[in-house]
Amino acid sequence: MPSNSSPEPGFARTDFVLPRAPDGSDAVYLAGNSLGAQPRAARTALLAAVDEQWAAVGVAGWEDCGWWATPQRLGDRVGALVGAAPGQVVVGDSTSVQLFGALIAAARLRPGRSVLVSDGGHFPTDRYLAASVARLTGLELRTASPDAMVPDADTAVVAVPAVDFRTGERWDLAAIVERAHEAGAVVLVDLSHAVGVMPVALDALDVDLAVGCTYKYLNGGPGAPAFAYVAARHHDVLDPPLTGWTGHADPFAMTEAWTPAPGVGRLRIGTPPMLSMLALDGALGVFDGPDSPDLAGVRAASLALGDAFLEALPDAADVVTPRAHERRGGHVAVRVRDAEGLCAALARRGVVVDARPPDLLRFGFAAPYVTVDDARTAARELAGLVQ
Ligand SMILES: Cc1ncc(COP(=O)(O)O)c(C=O)c1O
Ligand SMILES: Nc1c(O)cccc1C(=O)C[C@H](N)C(=O)O
C-alpha cells in the first residue's frame, strides 16, 4: 500500500471481490457510480451479523449487539467522510425517503417563504419528490441548473446535487450556498455521486441539509441504507414530517404523542434495516480503517483514472464531462449513438459500465478497486466498438 495521502489507483483491490467477466476473469468494473463492488469486509460483517448476532442473540441484539445505536454510529462514520462533525448524520432508509423528509424539513425551516428551487437536471427521484413536496407544502417549484439558480427573498429551499448524475459535472457548492444564504434560503444537497469519491466539507461550506446513498462509492451493497445530514444549528427547530417511533425521545415509553429525540436522532423513522447496516459497517473500513488513505488521496487517484481514460480515448470521442479536475465528479460520460447496445457489447468484452438515456455511456472511477489498466482497457474497447 502506498502512502496514506497519495494512494495508487486500485490501492485496495485485493480487499474487493469483483464481478466476473464472461471469460471468468475479473471484470473491468466501472459501474461503481451505480453499485460499488463488494468489499470482502462487507461480506464478513454481514455473515457475522447473521450467524453470530441474529441467530445467536435474537431480540436482545438491539441492546447487546448495539443494533439500536447503529443509525447514529454509522451516521458519524459517514459524517466524517462528508465533513460533518459527529451528531449530525443518521443512516437509514432509502435516499428517496431521506430526500422526502429533508425537503419538507427544509421547507419548514423557512415558514412564510413560497418557492422551492431545484436542479432541472436532478436525478429523477429528486425531481419527482420535489414536485410532490411542492404540491404537499404549497410551495412553487422552480427549476434551474445549479450554476444558474438565482434564489430570492421568496426562496425557502435550494435543492442541488453535488455532481450531475448524467454528465458527471461537479457543481460549485460553495457558490451555491453563498447565493442561497444571501437570499435567506436553506440548501439541501444530494451527495449520492460525491460521497466516497471526493472530499466534501458540509460543515465548512455551511450546507444546511444533505442526503446521499451508500451503495455507490461507499460500496455498502444493493439497497444499502442512505444517510441524512442536518447542520447542528437547525436541530432545535428541526420538524421532520416522518415522525416514526424510533425518532421519539423515549421510544419505549410508547407515549400518546410524538416527542422528538434530541438532535439529529429525530430523523430516525422506523426499525433500522440492520443486516444492510452491518454490511455497510464492514464496507466503510475501506475509507476509515487504520491504513485507509484520506479522501483527498482517493479523489486524486480517481481523477488520475479519469485522465488515463480520457487520454486513451480517440480525439473524436464526444466527452460530455468537463475535463477540468475541479469541475469533474467521479465518473466520465461519453455521448454515443447506441448507448444501450454499446453498454451490452462492452459487458461482453468484460467491461461493465452503464448507459443513461438518451445517449450516454458512464464510466465510474472508484479508485479503491479500479486500476489505470482498467481505465485504458475501457477506452480501448470503446474505441474498437465505435470506430
Ligand atoms: C442523485 C441521486 N439521488 C438518489 C438516487 C437514488 O435514490 P434511492 O437510493 O432512493 O434509489 C440516485 C441513484 O439511484 C442518485 O443518483
Ligand atoms: N439505485 C439504482 C438501482 O436500484 C438500480 C440501478 C441503478 C441504480 C442507480 O444507482 C442509478 C444511479 N443513481 C444513477 O446515477 O443513475
Image (cartoon, rainbow, N blue to C red):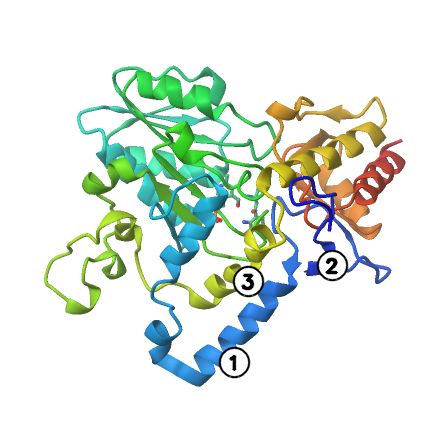
Q: Which mark is residue 51?
A: 1
User: Where is 122 relative to 292, above or below?
Assistant: above
Specify the amino acid type for callout 3: Gly
Name the residue: 40% across, 73% down. Answer: 65
**In the rendering, at what x and y percent does residue 319 appear?**
72, 25
Q: Who's the residue at 69% across and 41% down the image? A: 365
Instruction: Determine which of the numbered discs, if any, sits on residue 282 in the image.
Output: 3
Query: Is residue 144 in view?
Result: no
Can residue 106 be spotted in the picture?
Answer: yes
Crowding near the residue tagged with mark 3, few <14, some 14–19, many ≥20 C-alpha atoms within 10 Å: some
Q: CA distance from mark 3 to mark 1?
A: 15 Å
Q: Nearer the viewer, residue 12 or 378?
A: 12
* Image spot of residue 367 (x, y percent): 69, 44
| Label 2: which secondary element | helix
Q: Which quadrant of the figure has residue 206? A: top left
Q: CA distance from mark 3 to mark 2?
A: 15 Å
What amino acid type is highlighted by mark number 2?
Thr
